[in-house]
Image (cartoon, rainbow, N blue to C red):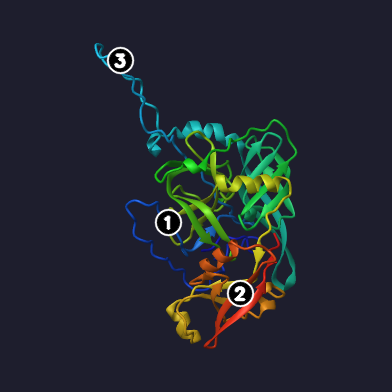
Amino acid sequence: MSYFDRPPTTPGSPLPPPAWPPGPPTVEPEPPAAPAPPAPRARSRVGLALLAGLVAGALGGAATGFVVADSRDDTPGVVTSAPSETPTTTAPTQVVTTVSELDVPGVVERALPAVVSIQVTSVGTGPFGRPITQRGSGSGFIVESDGIIYTNNHVVEGAEQVKVTLHDGRQLDGVVLGTDAGSDLAVVKVDATGLPTIPIGDSTKLRMGDPVIAIGNALALEGGPSVTTGVVSSLDRDITTNTGERLRHLLQTDAAINPGNSGGPLLNAAGEVIGINTAAAGNAENIGFAISMDHAKTLLEGLRDGTVTPRPFLGVQTTPIDEATRQQLGLDVTDGALVVAVTPGSAAENAGVRAGDVITKAGDREVRDPDDLGDALSDAKPGDRMTIEVRRGGQQLALEATLGQRAN
């Protein structure tokens, strides 16, 4: 899976395709549905893209979505009179079950004043080492009237200047209070009071099929945010990005989200935020992902105070093993995470991991693909000692790595 990252570019140039993974993406088959137990968490390597892009003379941005959830009570209230009287019933409890039943204009009218556009400026390296100005665009939403805004990390990552455009047209300077690349979350602050806000909802009450709304600055078009609708396609998805980030507990939706929408809110039928849109499948239709609020809110509250959850860092870039790769490199294994690059000075390099190694086990976890490696690392902490088993030139080696802490 891959994000729409914000790579260096020159003004007016088209956005380059995602640089990772190098080989064609593959999709792991879904397991057959069981009749009674809840569906297992899905694993996928579909080519996903973070929806933030450059606006250096071209349109770009990030992805936003609103998930519309309905009430969990599906039983209309019924009142029965005494046996001798004619039974009467109360009006059924209103339950929004389809997009057509959803009051989209009403939800949008309440939420739109708190949706913001975020423009960032950073300095990159262009041809011949010359510095170039990079500009990006994304979305966000106000959660406190004194200017606290939630968005994605990849919207503001590396920004030297942040400008926030409010719904009323005001453009204010933004200060990044905290970011967490591992969860793709960020908190921005603007100096203002009395701003409109969006309430936070309960994403644990969502069901597959619940109607949704997406609002965001799609393609950074002039004239304000765009609105789309859809349903909750699946719950509790895990994806791996092109940079090796493992995003967990995501909501999948078919509401259209596009570059420019990243960081925007995902709303339920009551107009509450139940997710933050972050990625979409670049090689499929109507497959988007949002970070569920019940998993994001604790991290976001910490980021507001400048607290970042420490995350382990091994220092490898890996790719799945397909038959063509196996034959080309003469590998004697069919499963594992093929190491294509090792970060200098990282735990992996210090342990002796090399490009071309195939990681087959990390700690107690068997590694069949890069997703397994990501899962093993997500359960660890910086400073933990982890045995990394690799296949190299027909030999099985056990290397001891002391995990570092990822820079945020």
Instruction: Please state the horizontal and vertical placement of residue 142, each as a whole percent of the image.
Output: 64, 39
Q: Which of 396/11 is in front?
A: 396
- Cα–Cα span, label 3 and label 2: 70 Å
Crowding around mark 3 (Cα neighbors within 10 Å: few <14, some 14 to 19, many 20+) is few
Instruction: Please state the horizontal and vertical placement of residue 155, each as a whole percent of the image.
Output: 63, 53
User: Is 135 drawn above or below residue 168 in the view shown?
Assistant: below
Q: How many marks?
A: 3
User: Is 399 drawn above or below residue 287 in the view shown?
Assistant: below
| 314 to the left or right of 286 | right
| Residue drawn 40% across the image and 39% down it | 99
Say whether marks 3 and 2 touch (CB < 8 Å).
Answer: no
User: Of the numbered discs in the image, which one, if any, rests on residue 40?
Assistant: 1
**Please, what secondary structure does the residue beneath circle 2 have?**
strand
Identify the mark nearer the N-term, 3 or 1.
Answer: 1
Q: Which residue is mark 2?
A: 387
- Mark 3 residue type: Ser
Identify the mark nearer the N-term, 3 or 2.
Answer: 3
- Mark 1 residue type: Pro
Q: Is residue 8 visible?
A: no
Q: Is residue 225 visible?
A: yes
Q: Which of 41/80 is in front?
A: 80
Q: Which residue is mark 3?
A: 81
**Please, what secondary structure does the residue beneath circle 1 have?**
loop
**Please, what secondary structure does the residue beneath circle 3 have?**
loop
Instruction: Please state the horizontal and vertical placement of residue 377, each as a whole percent of the image.
Output: 59, 65
- Mark 2 residue type: Thr
| 86 to the left or right of 272 | left
Q: Which of 138/339 is in front?
A: 339
- Cα–Cα span, label 2 and label 1: 28 Å
